[in-house]
């Protein structure tokens, strides 16, 4: 009976794989880089960068620090809804959020009982603790050091198998990892029985590609594409390309809306991700309070899984647009929006950190990191954040 059940399930999965979008599906979402580029809007594929080497170094260091602090902020409440986050902060007398999450003793009923001991809570932080959001930033730095900017998707897959523990990769990445182990090479590694292939996993891997391509959003998006197609398709891929292009643009312009527009210019104009970006930008002009724009976002996009690319990209955009280049406002808004909070805090913090530079970041957010990051990437267990940023700067100079 068990074998019959497996056979029926296998048959059902094969039937699902053969399905195509409905004839009235209003979006055009290409899979290959040539098709993506043909469907994107016009944009500056290369921009003039006038920063000195010292300024570039400071911006890259700011991006690393900003990413770590934003990730750390969102980590204790990962997966919480906005309402639950607000309730906790009000109980702590800390709403709206202006620092890392405070400890309430005793922990209120309905919240994780070990929350007070969480290493990411205010007063408990000693360094950037291990997180997949920063593991991939570190791993992709290694990919560039080992293979150069002409790395292939296959190179990325080999580094995953060599340097990432299987049980510490999740959703789309875990399925792709399993597929690689079973001899399924990219791009099939992204699609074979992978129900998570448009979730946020690729978007969190974007950052290093943007750091090493200042003023080159097209090239940054291309590097992101080569990485993303190992595990994702369509909007999962576009999310990584969008974030990488935005990061590339931060070194050439300080205008948030222009940065978002440049990110948008590297993904298909009729994709679902492009639609949510345009919507959130429009709502930010209509509503003075980010929570009103959040309500509109969830009204239209709340049906997506809490770890999907679409709705989480919206949380990043709310932080960027309503944060107005203020680091604290930006990361706290992105995190207070809920969903995949550590991912969204990390991406928002990375972009604003790259805009402001390390010297301009508020000390209360950066000091607790103690310039130290923990990672489960083999060979990078305990690193200085400043060393990683120096290595990134060195790569950027070569590229």
Image: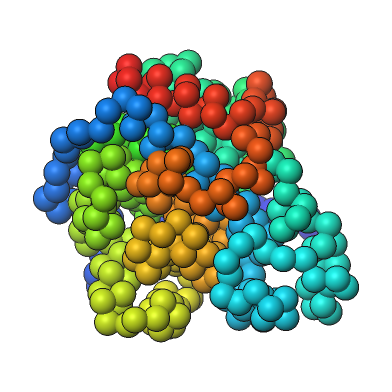
Q: Quadrant of residue 322?
A: bottom left
Q: Position of residue 268 (x, y in %)?
A: 23, 54
Q: Position of residue 318 (x, y in %)?
A: 40, 68
Q: Could you tell me which residue is drawn at 20 percent across and 33 percent down? A: 50
Q: Position of residue 14 (x, y in %)?
A: 51, 53
Left or right: residue 190 versus residue 263 is right
Residue nearer the viewer, 327 or 151: 327
Left or right: residue 273 versus residue 189 is left
Asked if residue 162 is positioned above or below residue 328 in the image, the reply reads above
Asked if residue 21 is positioned above or below residue 61 in the image, the reply reads below
Q: Could you tell me which residue is drawn at 82 percent across and 62 percent down? A: 116
Left or right: residue 102 versus residue 248 is right
Q: Position of residue 338 (x, y in %)?
A: 56, 69
Residue nearer the viewer, 320 or 344: 320
Would you say residue 79 is visible in this rendering? yes
Q: Could you tell me which residue is drawn at 58 percent across and 51 percent down? A: 365
Asked if residue 204 is positioned above or below residue 318 in the image, the reply reads above
Instruction: Please tell me how many numbered marks the rendered image carries.
Output: 0
Spot the residue most to the left.
42
Q: Could you tell me which residue is drawn at 32 percent across and 20 percent down? A: 397
Residue nearer the viewer, 275 or 386: 386
Q: Quadrant of the C terminus?
A: top left
Q: Quadrant of the N terminus?
A: bottom right
Coloring basis for residues: rainbow
Would you say residue 266 is visible in this rendering? no
Q: Quadrant of residue 53?
A: top left
């Amino acid at each position: 009976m068990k074998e019959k059940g497996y056979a029926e399930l296998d048959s059902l999965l094969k039937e699902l794989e053969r399905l195509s979008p409905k004839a009235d599906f209003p979006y055009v979402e290409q899979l290959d880089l040539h098709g993506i580029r043909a469907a994107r809007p016009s944009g500056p594929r290369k921009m003039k960068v006038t920063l000195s080497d010292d300024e570039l170094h400071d911006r890259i260091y700011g991006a690393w620090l900003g990413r770590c602090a934003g990730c750390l902020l969102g980590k204790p409440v990962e997966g919480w809804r906005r309402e639950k986050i607000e309730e906790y902060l009000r109980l702590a007398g800390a709403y709206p959020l202006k620092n890392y999450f405070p400890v309430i003793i005793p922990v209120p009923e309905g919240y994780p009982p070990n929350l007070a001991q969480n290493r990411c809570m205010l007063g408990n932080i000693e360094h950037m603790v291990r997180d997949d959001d920063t593991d991939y930033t570190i791993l992709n730095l290694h990919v560039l050091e080992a293979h150069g900017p002409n790395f292939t998707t296959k190179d990325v897959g080999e580094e995953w198998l060599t340097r990432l523990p299987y049980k510490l990769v999740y959703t789309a990445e875990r399925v792709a990892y399993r597929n690689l182990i079973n001899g399924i090479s990219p791009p099939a590694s992204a699609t074979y029985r992978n129900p998570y292939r448009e979730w946020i996993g690729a978007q969190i891997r974007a950052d290093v590609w943007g750091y090493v391509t200042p003023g080159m959003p097209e090239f940054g998006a291309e590097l992101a594409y080569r990485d993303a197609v190992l595990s994702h398709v369509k909007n999962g891929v576009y999310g990584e390309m969008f974030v990488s292009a935005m990061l590339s643009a931060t070194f050439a312009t300080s205008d948030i809306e222009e940065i978002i527009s440049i990110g948008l210019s590297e993904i298909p104009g009729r994709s679902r991700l492009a639609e949510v970006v345009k919507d959130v930008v429009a709502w930010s002009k209509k509503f003075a309070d980010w929570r009103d724009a959040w309500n509109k976002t969830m009204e239209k996009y709340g049906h997506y899984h809490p770890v999907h690319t679409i709705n989480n990209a919206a949380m990043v955009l709310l932080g960027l647009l309503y944060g107005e280049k203020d680091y604290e406002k930006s990361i706290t808004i992105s995190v207070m929006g809920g969903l995949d909070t550590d991912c969204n805090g990390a991406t928002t913090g990375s972009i604003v950190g790259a805009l402001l530079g390390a010297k301009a970041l508020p000390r209360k957010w950066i000091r607790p990191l103690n310039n130290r990051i923990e990672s489960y990437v083999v060979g990078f267990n305990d690193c200085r954040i400043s060393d990683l940023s120096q290595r990134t700067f060195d790569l950027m100079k070569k590229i």
